[in-house]
Image (cartoon, rainbow, N blue to C red):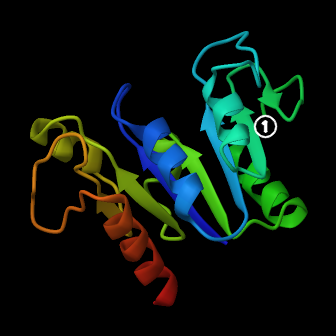
Amino acid sequence: MITIAFIGFRKSGKTTLIRELLHVVKGRVAVIKRIHDYGQEFDVRGKDTWVFSREGAETVIGLAPDKTHILFNRPIELNKVINMISELAKPDYLMMEGFSDEVKDRSDVIKVILPRSIGEVEELTNGVKPPLIIYCGLCKCRLEGCVDSVNELINRILSYEAN
């Protein structure tokens, strides 16, 4: 299973990029969405979790501060959810929206950083251990090593799998 975390501030394009990838990656995909607000509903028309399930994700899980949407009426630690998805859904790809603090030290997670401006690059990458990819589709920073197309991002992700 290739595990990818999409990290960026609000409105940086995380959801949009995951939606694009759902249409082009080959294989089964699971998505875990970080939900920041208490009392948030799950699988409601127009919400990210609803969109992910309609656009190709075989498994969608929402982790909120007060519950885990699969539906457990209590929060569950991210590692336990990852292990559960790996065992039950057996996806080829696990895409996580958010979770920067939980994954920044993990070498088994590809971190895709989505800055909205060149000024956010350092803030979002500070303390994040490889593997990481800066996706400059929104900020167009064109820093060395950045990718700015979905195809280039997929190729970079697959190159990590080959190593």
Q: Is residue 109 above or below residue 35?
A: below
Q: Where does label 1 land, which residue?
A: 76
x, y (%) of residue 142? 10, 56
Q: Residue at x 10, y 66 (%)?
A: 144
x, y (%) of residue 71? 89, 30
Q: Residue furthest bottom?
A: 163
Count of labels in the image: 1
Q: Residue furthest top?
A: 39
x, y (%) of residue 93? 64, 65
Image quadrant where residue 67 sits = top right
Image quadrant where residue 46 sits = top right
Q: Nearer the viewer, residue 115 or 20?
A: 20
Q: Is residue 28 left or right of residue 19?
A: right
Q: Nearer the viewer, residue 46 or 122?
A: 46
Q: Is residue 120 above or below residue 160?
A: above
x, y (%) of residue 114? 31, 44
Q: Residue at x 11, y 37 (%)?
A: 119
Circle 1 Cα neighbour tier, 10 Å, few/some/many (<14 / 14–19 / ≥20): some
Q: Is residue 154 left or right of residue 94?
A: left
Q: Residue at x 78, y 37 (%)?
A: 76
Specify the amino acid type for callout 1.
Ile
Q: Residue at x 73, y 55 (%)?
A: 82
Q: Is residue 124 left or right of residue 55?
A: left
Q: Is residue 29 left or right of residue 22?
A: right
Q: Is residue 49 above or below residue 58?
A: above
Q: Nearer the viewer, residue 12 or 124?
A: 12
